Amino acid sequence: MDKIFLIGIAGGSGSGKTTFARKVMKGISNLDSSMLHMDSYYLPTQPKTNYTSSGKPNFDHPNAFDWDLLRQHLTALKNGLSIKCPIYDFKSSGRTGEYETIGPCRVVLFEGIFALYDQEIRDLLDIKCYLHVDSDIRFTRRLHRDVKERGRSLESVISQYYDTVRPMYQKYLDPQRQYADFTVGEETDVASLILSARIKEMLTTSQDLEAHEAI
């Protein structure tokens, strides 16, 4: 079986993970690849134990995600299978009940705030990236995105940032940098080209090895 490559891209909310992943996808556009968003794996209903003192769900805590399903799906993709990824609606904060088929493919870019958090998932990844961007830039990007794309009010975005986003970043997200193979800053153009080239190199090496073993 052809070797499947999983690339993990982590970083705080608003660090540009999806944008960076799209740049990498463009750089390997001639390859068999897909993108998997960790946001798709938010739990259908947030557990009450995960609510803040103000009575709001904490979407920036590890317990906000369906880890069992995520591990199953990443393992399946790594084994060359397809998955039915749930579709999450940010406006209603729940799953739509519909699914997107992803895979099988040779390269999967997996991006999310906790992409490098779980050891079992880290062990599946061939390359681990972390986007380290200043907090003021991340906050501004999140503000524009949530108001424009997710129907949030300015006040709710600011409140959520101070209640959960900022403290969870400091406690859980930033420490993931220690697991990264390389860290990417705000300027991602060169970094995306480097990562694209590395992925192509890994694929070429793998194909040469597979061809040699077939002889």
Image (cartoon, grey):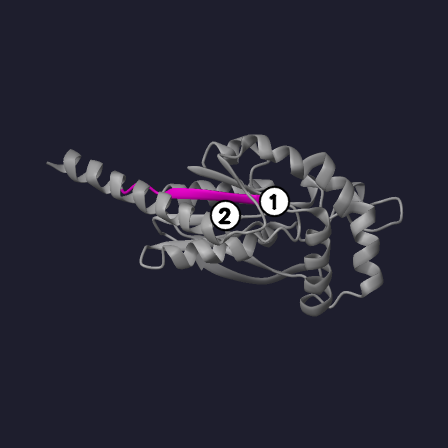
Horizontal and vertical percent position of residue 154 = 81, 64
Horizontal and vertical percent position of residue 58 = 76, 47
Residue 20 seen in the current view: yes
Q: How many marks?
A: 2
Viewer-proximal residue, 103 or 150? 150
Residue matched to label 1: 11
- Location of the C terminus by quadrant is top left
The label on residue 140 is none
Viewer-proximal residue, 148 or 194? 194
Horizontal and vertical percent position of residue 63 = 69, 40
Tell me the crowding category of disc 1: few under 14, some 14 to 19, or many 20 or more residues within 10 angstroms, Cα based: many
Residue 84 seen in the current view: no
Q: Is residue 142 magenta?
A: no
- Describe the element under mark 1 as helix, strand or loop: strand
Left or right: 6 in relation to 153: left
Report the residue at 52% width, 45% height from top. 9
Report the residue at 38% width, 42% height from top. 5
- Location of the N terminus by quadrant is top left
Pointers 1 and 2 in contact (CB under 8 A)? no
Q: Earlier in the sequence, mark 1 or mark 2?
A: 1
Provide the residue span drawn in magenta: 2-11
Residue matched to label 2: 110
Q: Given the image, on which type of amino acid does mark 1 rest?
A: Gly
Viewer-proximal residue, 58 or 147? 147
Left or right: 49 in relation to 12: right
Report the residue at 62% width, 50% height from top. 15
Left or right: 61 in relation to 68: right
Q: Given the image, on which type of amino acid does mark 2 rest?
A: Phe
Q: Is residue 112 above or below residue 212?
A: below
Report the residue at 68% width, 61% height from top. 90
- Describe the element under mark 2 as helix, strand or loop: strand
